[in-house]
Amino acid sequence: KAGVTQTPRYLIKTRGQQVTLSCSPISGHRSVSWYQQTPGQGLQFLFEYFSETQRNKGNFPGRFSGRQFSNSRSEMNVSTLELGDSALYLCASSLANRGGYEQYFGPGTRLTVT
Amino acid sequence: AQTVTQSQPEMSVQEAETVTLSCTYDTSESDYYLFWYKQPPSRQMILVIRQEAYKQQNATENRFSVNFQKAAKSFSLKISDSQLGDAAMYFCAYQGNDYKLSFGAGTTVTVRA
């Protein structure tokens, strides 16, 4: 069974631009979560989708948004990029709609904002 | 909000020896899950072990075991017979009723040959 895939793997953008990252979960998984990883702040939760509905959102500004499609694929968008948005963005998918199930992580998208 | 604390930024262990990583957490929930994830230099997050809070028995996965002390809100990871491939950053994570994972700052484990 294929793992979680994220595209693109690397991205360089300029301040003020916007970016869209994509995540394809493991087949059959309906929950997709997004995390931001930076050296200074560590791993922080962005949001989680289940069956196209956002169930939870972390403490990020409204510039960060996401959505999930009917096939469970998810995208996150960051508008008006800032230098501080440079990070590794990790996507994770999970089988169940309740806690305790393993979240399988993708390889991440490395975003650099210049 | 739940907080997860890993007080050891770095740990070093001799190959074949044992190392224990510390993790404490703060929560008012009674039902939750705890995890240890491993992130090698490839950055791929890999689940090492999982513990349900309602289970008193400590989880074990091959050379990895935990010491779960619910009253103390402590969840340490023991790596036995350390191998070179165990070198990575290890994250302790908490999952409560809102499904999200709250991570600690991580502990970098170095294995000396």
Image (tube, coloured by chain):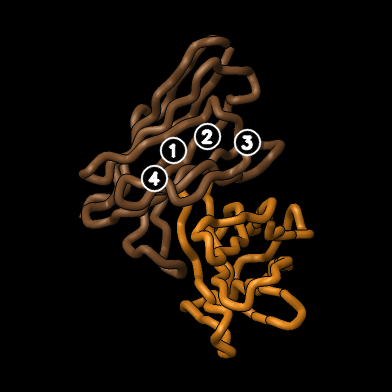
Residue B83 makes an appearance in the image: no
At horizontal 44% and vertical 20% (from top left) the residue drawn is A19
Which one is earlier in the sequence, the residue at label 4 or at label 3? 3
In the rendered image, the quadrant that contains the C terminus of chain B is: bottom right
Residue indicated by mark 3: A38
Type of amino acid under label 4: Gly
Do callouts 4 and 1 point to residues on the same chain?
yes
Q: Is residue B60 left or right of residue B20?
A: left
Question: Does dot 2 land on a helix, a strand or a loop?
Answer: strand
Q: Are marks 3 and 1 on the same chain?
A: yes
Identify the residue position indicated by label 1 in the image.
A108
Q: Which quadrant of the figure has residue B34?
A: bottom right
Element marked by disc 3: strand
Which residue was labeled with disc 2? A88
- Vertical position of residue A76 compared to residue B44: above or below: above
Chain for numbered disc 3: A
